[in-house]
Amino acid sequence: MINIGTIGITDWKRRRSLGCLAVLLLAGASTAPPRTVLHPRLSRTWNIIGYDLQFRPISGDAPFTPAGKAIFERRLAAYDKGTLEQEPPNQCRPHGVPRIMMSPYPFEIVDTGDRVTIFHEVAHNVRSILMNQPHPANVPLTYLGNSVGHWEGETLVVDTIRLRPETWIDEAGKPHSDKLHVVERMTPSVDGKTLDVRIRIEDPVYYTRPWETQRSFKTDATLKIAEYVCEDGLGAAADFFK
Amino acid sequence: MKRALLLAGLLLSACHPKSSGPIDFSGLWMPDTKVVTPVGGTIPLLPAAAAVAKANATSAERGDFGFDNWMKCSLHGMPRIMLTASPFRLLQTPAKLYTVHAVNHSYRVMPIVAKHGAGEPSYMGDAIASIDGDRLHIETTKLVAGLIDREGLPHSDALKLTEDYKLSSDGQTLSGTIRIEDPKTFSAPWSFAVSFHRLAPAELPENICVDLTDAQKKALR
Amino acid sequence: MKILTAIIGALALVAGVAAQAHHSAAPYDNKKLIHVSGTVAAMRYTNPHIMIKLMTSKGMFAVEGSSVNQLARKGWTRTTINPGDKVTMDLWPLRDGGQGGFMISIRLPSGKILK
C-alpha cells in the first residue's frame, strides 16, 4: 500500500502529490519516496536535565492505596539502608514505562509518520509507538508495554498499557500493577532545544486516583546515542572486586 | 489530443524530478543467509586466525558454545546479526537509516553522510550509509573484536565492513554482498553474498536475552 | 497488529536464570563526601560502571564510577587514568562503612580535576 498521507500539508500539495503518484504509477515505479519528517523538532537526541530518583507528583503527594504505600516504603527503606531491592534493569531487563524516561542516558526520537521509535542508549532499549490507531486486542504484557500515539499540534501524546508489573514506576520503587495506564505528552520547545514530558499515571491497584509528574530534556548538535551493552556488565563488579 | 498532451505535460512538470526522491528501503526484513560462502571459494585466513576458526567450528559441532559470547547475552553485532534468524525493521529518514533487530532488541544507527564520526568501538560499529537509486551502501568501522558467524569465524578490531544491497524491482528482496577487510585476521579482503526477504507488516515481539533459556539462545545463534 | 510470533516462535519469554545484580549508586551515601588518595592498582573501563581498585594507606578501596558513555560526554577516554597513577578522589562512601565509594570527582597526576 502506497501511503501518501501527510498530515497538515496544504490541499494544493496533496493534489500535486496525487498527480505525481499517477505519473509514477503510469511510469511503473514500484515504491513511493519516504515521507519527510513533519515534526522535526521532536526527532532529535535528548538527554535528561537533572536527576531525581523519584517521579514526584506535580501537586500534592503520591496518592497511594495502602498496598501501594506499603511496597513503596519498604523499597525506600531498603534503598536508605544500602540493601536495595532488585528491579528489572539491575539484571538487564527493560526498565518499563515511565521509568525508562528518567534514566540518565540519552535517547533518540525518530518520527517516520506511521510510527515513532525511541532509541534509548540505556541497555539498547527500543520503544515503538504506533501512530493513529487504537491499542490492539490480546497483546501480551511486556516490559515496555504497548504504546500508541497521536499528535495534538506539536505535542506527541503516547498512550501505554500492558506493562509487566515487575517493573517500577521510578528508581525509588513506586509500584505498579498490570493495570497501569500511562499517558505521556511530549512537547518540544519552539527553539527545539528542550523537550517537556508530562506524564499521567493511572493504576487503581496502587493509586487512589490518577496523578501527574514531569521531566525535561535538552538537546544539542553534539549529542549522540552510544552503544551500551548492559549484559556485558553482569557479574562484573563481583568478579573485579574479589 | 493537444489537451491530453498539455495535461500530461502539466502532470509531468508537477512531478519535478526531485520530488520522486530516493527509494524507500523501510520495512520488516528477514535474513535468508545462514552460512558464509566466500565469493571466489576460500576465506583467506591468516594462520593464527585459521587455528581459532577451526577450534571454534569443532566446538560448535560438539555443541559446546563456550566461544560464543551471545550465549552470555552479549550482542551479535555486525556482521553476524545479518546472518541470524531474527527479523529486523529498517527505518529510513532523509538523514539516517536505522535497523531494529528483534533478537535482544539491538539496533544500528546509520547516518547518510560521507565521513565517520568520533566514538568508541562497539558491537554494531560506526556505520555510514549512502543510497543510489535502488542501491544501499553501508561502510562500518570501529567494531570490537568478535565473531563473523555462528561457526565462530573470528574478526579483529581492525575489521572494516562494506555492505552493498540492491532492492529487487518488486521490492520484496534485498540482496547483495558484505565485504570483509581485516588485515589482522585475513590475508586479503573477501566477500560473501547475503539476502533478505520482506515480511508482511507486523510488530517485532519482545525478546530479552536474559529471559531466554539456553535452548532458545542456541536457536538464535 | 500482528506480532511475529511465527518467526521467533518458540522463543516466548520465560523466567530467566539468576544473574548477578549490577550495582547502582544505591549502596553509597549521597549526602556525604569523603576524600581518598592512593595509587590506581587496577581498572575496568567498561559499562555499566567503571571500576577502580585504589591502593590507599588504609588498604584497597573499591571505587565505582559512572558509565563509559556518561564519562565520555565529560571528556574521559579509556586512558584518562591508568594503573600506577597517583590520584585523589572525592567519593560518596559505602553506606555499610566498607572501604569503597562512588567516584564524584578525581584529581589526575597532571593536577587536572575531572568530574
Image (cartoon, coloured by chain):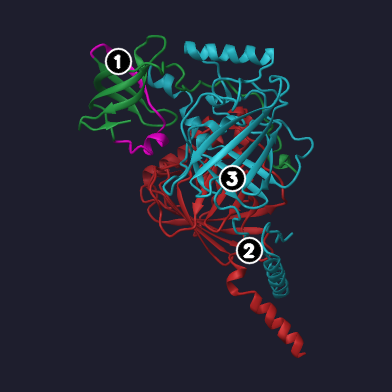
What separation in Å lies between label 3 and label 1 (alpha carbons)?
Answer: 43 Å
Instruction: Between label 2 and label 1, give the one nearer the viewer.
Output: 2
Q: Position of residue A223 (x, y in %)?
A: 44, 45
- Answer whether residue B185 is visible to the viewer in this image: yes
Chain B, chosen colour in render: red
Q: Position of residue B111 (x, y in %)?
A: 49, 54
- Answer whether residue B221 is visible to the viewer in this image: no
Q: Position of residue B29 (x, y in %)?
A: 64, 51
- Verify whether residue B74 appears in magenta: no
- Left or right: A73 with respect to A66? left
Q: Which residue is mark 2?
A: A33
Whether the residues at callouts 3 and 1 have beta carbons within 8 Å, the answer is no
The residue closer to the viewer here, A170 or A57, is A57
The green one among the chains is C
Work out which quarter of the rendered image holds the N terminus of chain B and state it: bottom right
Q: Position of residue A128 (x, y in %)?
A: 64, 42
Mark 3 nearby-residue class (10 Å; few <14, some 14–19, many ≥20): many
Give the secondary structure at mark 2: loop
Q: Which residue is mark 3?
A: B100
Tell me which residue sits at (75%, 90%) in the image: B2
Residue range in magenta is C57-79
Q: Which residue is mark 1?
A: C60
Count the marks. Answer: 3
Chain A, chosen colour in render: cyan
What is the residue that sits farthest to the right in this orientation? A137
Tell me which residue sits at (69%, 78%) in the image: B11
